[in-house]
Each structure stands twice: as structure tokens, then as C-alpha cells.
Amino acid sequence: MQMRFFQRAAIGALLLAPGLVAAQDMLQGVDLSQPAYSQAELTRADVEAAVKAGKADFSGKSLNGLDLSGLDLSGVNFRAARLNKARLAGATLDKAILDQAWLMQADLTGASLKGAQAFAAQMQKLRGDGADFSGARVAGDLTGASLRKARFNGANLSADMKNQSMGLMRAVLRSAALEGAQFVGANLMSADLRFAHAAEANFTDANLMNADAAGADFSGATFKGAMVKDLDLDSAQIDAAAETVLSSAQHLDRARRQ
């Protein structure tokens, strides 16, 4: 009975929310206090048993608040699962499927998500300091997330121009803490970096074309070899020494200098 409630509540929220039309605005009309988004229908022991048995498919499951820290969840299917406030610190989620998953305020500190898929994921205020997203596909909402010294090397955080019926899907890092984060060779084309705190971040060889970084802090950031055509730097903080490499960005004249 309880499991049916979880399933009905989740399906109802998806049908009512504009996520099917604009996947990064799924919070509108969703009651996050309902059990499907605030409770868990499984225990850590259940998860461990499923992984051990090779039957680890948690798509659509409610795993909110579970302590799954340190587990090897490589390649596991979490599509549309709810993991709000779950603890996944130090967990291995390499090549895991997190499309349309809910990870709001989840703890992924030091976790490995190399090659993972996180399309249309809701990850607002996620804690992922030191996490490794290298080679991952991240087109979700990370507004307010803490990602200090996280690694996105070779990751794809760009806008998906093929699914416009779902709205503009891209990585949203608005107001995220990105100090010291690594984006070497990452694709951030059309990503949302407004008001991001990216001091000392490394964007070497990254694609930042058409990204919106208005109001962002790039103090001490590295842009060697980066593609920055039409990167919006309106009111962004930059180093005067970086002006040459940022010469093709938009609103460079409005950027604040160190």
C-alpha cells in the first residue's frame, strides 16, 4: 500500500509539473513535503542487497534521506528516482543513470560520477565538494550547489538543442560555489553560470561559447585555450590579465577588474 502511494504521488507530480514541457522548471506545482519527495521506501540494506544480487534498478524509487555513503553504485539506474537529502558522500556512481532524478540537498562530497548521465536532474543546493564528474553528461539544475574543487574535466554541460519541446536543457550553475573547480576540456556552451563563485577555477580548453556568466566571480580563474565567443560577462569579476583571452566575450567592457 505504501509503495503504491509513493508511485502514484510521483507520477501525479510529473503529470502536473511542467517538467514534461520545461524540464528545468519541475519544482512548480510539486509539493516536496509529500512522502514521495521526503521519505524512503527502501533501506540502505535493501539497496546493498539489490546491488549484491545484480538487480540494482532504482528507477522511480523514493530513496530520500538514505545514507548510501561509500557504496559502489556504478552503472546503477536511478532514472526519475528521488534522492533528496540522501547521503552519497564517497560513493561511486561512475556511469550511473541519474536522468530526471531528484538530488536536492543531497550530499555527494568526494563522490565519483565519472561518465554518469544526469539529464533534467534536479540538484539544487547539492553538496559535491571534491566530487568527480569527469566525462559526465550534466544538463540539470545545480543552482546554489557547493562544488568547490569538483572535477568536470571533459564533461558535457552544454545546452541540448535537440529537445526544445522540453525547454532549453543545460547545466544551471547559478550562484553555485565553484571555487577551485576543474573544467578542463569541458563543454559549457550556453550553460548558466550567472553569479557563480568560480574564483581560481580552471577552464583550460573549455567551450564557454554563448554561456551566461553575468555577475560571476572569475577571480584568478584560468581560461587558457578556452572558446569564449559570446560568453556574457556583464558585471562579472575578472582578472585584468585575462582580458586578451576573453576578448571575444560579450559585455567585456562591463566586467569588473581585479
Image (tube, rainbow, N blue to C red):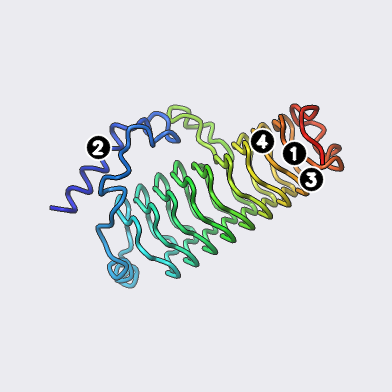
Residue annotated with mark 4: 213
Residue count near mark 2 (Cα–Cα under 10 Å), binned few <14, some 14–19, many ≥20: few
Mark found first going from the N terminus, 4 or 3: 4
Rendered location of residue 84, percent (x, y)? 38, 52
- Marks 4 and 2: which is nearer the front? 4
Figure quadrant of residue 195: top right
User: What's under tag 2, amino acid-wise?
Assistant: Gly
Mark 4 vs mark 1, CA separation in Å: 10 Å
Question: Which is nearer the N-term, disc 2 or disc 1?
Answer: 2
**Residue at 48% across, 28% down:** 164
The local crowd at label 4, few if under 14, some if 14 to 19, many if 20 or more residues have their Cα within 10 Å, is many
Nearer to the camera, 141 or 59: 141
Check disc 4 and report its element: helix, strand or loop.
Answer: loop
Residue assigned mark 1:
237
Callout 3 amino acid: Gly
Q: Are marks 2 and 3 in contact (CB under 8 Å)?
A: no
> Between disc 2 and disc 3, whose residue precedes?
2
Q: Secondary structure at mark 2?
A: helix
Residue to which mark 2 is pinned: 12
Q: Which residue: 52% across, 63% down?
A: 111
Residue 205, position in %: x, y? 74, 47
Q: Nearer the viewer, mark 4 or mark 1?
A: 1
Q: Within 10 Å of the Cα at label 3, are there few (<14), some (14-19), or many (20+) other Cα atoms?
A: some
Image position of 75 with respect to 14: above or below: below
Residue 154 drawn at (x, y percent): 64, 52
Q: Closer to the camera: disc 4 or disc 3?
A: 4
Q: Secondary structure at mark 3?
A: loop
- Left/right of residue 179 with respect to residue 81 in the rendered view: right
Asked where in the image residue 176 lies, by quadrant, the reply is top right
Residue located at (42% from left, 47% from top): 99
Q: Residue furthest left?
A: 1
Q: Which residue is mark 3?
A: 225
